[in-house]
Amino acid sequence: MHLILFFLFAGLCLAGAINLLLQSHPINSALSLIVVMTSLAVLYLLLGAEFLAAAQVIVYAGAVMVLFTFVIMLLNAGREERTLGSRVALTLGFPAVAAILALLATVILKAEGLGRAAMQDGITSTEELSKILFTNLLLPFEVTSVLILIAILGAVALARRGDGERTAGK
C-alpha cells in the first residue's frame, strides 16, 4: 500500500511541478506549487516523519503560499484575459497523461513484493528534530526567514511604485 501511495503522490508532485513551469499565469503557478507542497507532505508522512508533514502543510502550503499569492496579486494588478488553454496542451496533454498512467499501472502491477515495504526502527522523534533545528541549524533557519521577509517587502515596494510616483509635495 505504501508503494502505491508513493507512486501516486510522487506522480502528482511531478505533474504539479511540470504544470508550475508550463503555466502562463502566476496564480495558476502558485496553485500548482501548493499541489507540489501538499504532495511532498504526504510523502513525508509515508516516511514516518509526521512533524515534517505537518510543518510542510502549515508553513509552506499554508502560510508561505498565501503570502506568495498575495504578492502575486499585488504585482499583477492588471486584468487578465480569459483563455481556454493552449492547443498544444490539449493535443499532447491527454495522450501524455494516458501514457504516464499506463506506465505507472504497469510498473505497480508487475512489481514484486508490493506489500513488503516496512518502516525502519530508527525514526527520529520530534524532540530530536527540534534540538537539531534550533541549535545546529538556527542560523540558516533565521537567514531563510529574513530573506523571505525581504522578498515580500521588495514586492510590496514594487507594487506601490507601479501606482505612480508619490512625491512629498503632493
Image (spheres, rainbow, N blue to C red):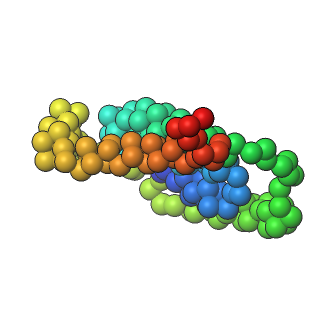
Q: Residue at x 39, y 33 (%)?
A: 54
> Where on the picture, by quarter, is residue 23?
bottom right
Residue 121, horizontal then vertical, whole percent: 21, 43
Residue nearest the observer in this picture, 2 or 74 = 74
Percent position (x, y) of residue 155? 51, 46
On screen, residue 93 versus residue 50, left or right, reads right
Q: Quadrant of residue 160?
A: top right
- Is 98 positioned to the left or the right of 60 in the image? right
Question: Does residue 25 appear in this view?
Answer: yes
Q: Position of residue 116 (x, y in %)?
A: 40, 50
Q: Is residue 94 above or below residue 49?
A: below
Check the picture and name the quadrant holding the C terminus: top right
**Which residue is painted at 70% across and 52% down in the image?**
25
Task: Please tell me which residue lies in front, 7 or 157.
Answer: 157
Residue at figure coordinates x 65%, y 57% from the top left: 19
Percent x, y of residue 157: 51, 44
